[in-house]
Image: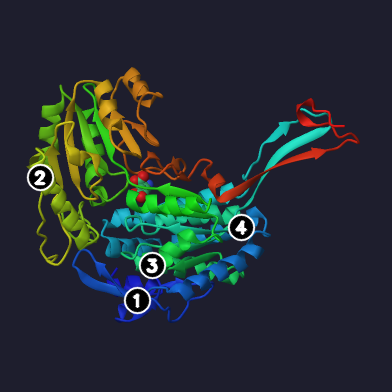
Amino acid sequence: MRTPDILAKLGLTQVADGGTVSGVYAGRWIESPAGETITSLDPATGQVLGRVTMGGADDYEATVASAQEAFQRWRQLPAPKRGELVRLCGEALREHRDALGALVTLEMGKILPEGVGEVIEMIDIADFSVGLSRQLYGLSMHSERPGHRMYEQWHPLGVMGIISAFNFPVAVWSWNAFVAAVAGDTMIWKPSPVTPLCAVAVQNIVNPVMESEGFGGVFNLCVGDVDPVGETMIADRRLPLISATGSVRMGKRVGEVVGGRLGRSLLELGGNNALAIMDDANLELALRGVLFGAVGTAGQRCTSTRRVLLHESVADEFTERLTRAYGTIPIGNPMDGKTLCGPLASQAAVDGFLAAIETVKGQGGELLCGGGRATVPGGEGGFYVEPTLVRAPTDLPMMQEETFAPLLYLVTVSDIEEAIAVQNGVPQGLSSAVFTSNLQTAERFLSYAGSDCGIANVNIGTSGAEIGGAFGGEKDTGGGREAGSDSWKAYMRRQTCTINGTDELPLAQGISFG
Ligand code: UN1
């Protein structure tokens, strides 16, 4: 598909013709929002892909009004009927799967199978949410009082805010939006300003479905800067929940402001994911796991593998095989079927990567391969870097930080105990993995004294989770859980109800009062 065709299929013809689109949807598109116009670049070429006008303070207010009005009606709709609308959104996404996947690739730079994979993740969470719409179960309890009954029920929470990052410009919205929608909430989305076209395209796909059923105000969008949109949103008492994905620094600010007004925040922040390879591991499997985890999405997943912890008996062999494999990774335009490593998302990301390499070298890390910009024919203005391997001592200070790029540290450890200690010895706690054929080693890694992460895998890499499991992590990763399992509870309010079916009024704890 050619770029103009992709844009046309997603209702972005104006952009293809060099025009500007609105970044604010408040139950309907706001024609001329008051914010600045931002330029979205194709990271493969550095060329302009399109222009989007951001929202100002009044535009943000319009999204709140739209979401509040819709909430009054949306919450009255039975959950399975809300699920039916989400099912129709899933159908619309199926129709636009390839075009939206291609736009993700064009605007963010991940390779096409991963761009399309992101849309598949959206479809999966839509299906999951449809089923969930009939399973918002509460418990019932036996009361200690005769003839009394206790149970809990779950009600919609209200209008929520979704702040998403550039690296998963569409899927992470849907993890929140579809689950929240069946829960009965309405929402305002502030996407990353690096990927505003993806956000506009998503609205163009789902909102015709919602509008035709009279519910255009459920999914609202306000592309905007931290000021006025981001800061106003997190401080806004009308939004009982803010779900934010991004850096630890951003998450701390969200947590502080939302906590200060006793709101709820659901945080999915940075990772610093380690993959341990033990002496009895299937090295071929481990190699594939490391390559996808460290080089996939050019190392820009929060679940990307950042550290490989090698048992001393396999360290040399694995390092050699991995270095050889790194030498053959096709770097190039992410639309090209042969490419495995596309560009970083922005020039700022390239600068961050190059600075990190300098720091690592200064701290005693040994560069095994890569470390610089990559040259790609036809991609002269693009944001390409080389997948990089660094042999590192366990205490290399930079290894405590998440560098959002294909920079992988190799560390030698002597046993599973040391692997677990190094794996846990960082501020973040998102994803982790061990490769071993030994059941006891695997169980040791998964035990309460093993990995401290929200995700712990055996013989699978650190990235590429399915939507059915709860996704998120501990420590600086923020503690939130999204997508699968019972993460829907974050989007609802729980009410405990006690009902007396007798003519007596016994008090709990046997208290007699007068
Ligand atoms: C993220 O990088 O923010 O597990 C999300 C994975 C993907 C989601 C990553 N399913 O790698």
Q: Which residue is mark 4?
A: 82
Identified by mark 4, the residue type is: Arg
Residue 420 at x, y = what percent?
29, 26
Instruction: Give the Cα distance between marks 4 and 2.
Output: 50 Å
Instruction: Give the Cα distance between marks 1 and 2.
Output: 43 Å
Look at discs 4 and 1 and give the one toward the viewer: 1
Look at discs 4 and 3 and give the one toward the viewer: 3
Q: Is residue 128 left or right of residue 436?
A: right
Q: Which SS class for mark 4?
A: helix
Residue name at image x 67 percent, y 56 percent: 78
Residue name at image x 51 percent, y 68 percent: 207
Residue 157 occupies quadrant? bottom right
Residue 513's place in the image compared with 268, above or below, is: above
| Mark 1 or 2, nearer chain start | 1
Residue 481 at x, y = what percent?
46, 43
Look at discs 1 and 3 and give the one toward the viewer: 3
Residue 217 at x, y = what percent?
56, 68
Identified by mark 1, the residue type is: Glu
Asked whether the residues under the numbered discs 4 and 2 touch, taking CB atoms below 8 Å apart as contact, a structural biologist would say no
Identified by mark 3, the residue type is: Asp
Which numbered dot is residue 36?
Answer: 1
Q: Which residue is mark 3?
A: 227
Tag 2: Cα neighbours inside 10 Å, few (<14), some, or many (≥20)? few
Tag 1: Cα neighbours inside 10 Å, few (<14), some, or many (≥20)? few
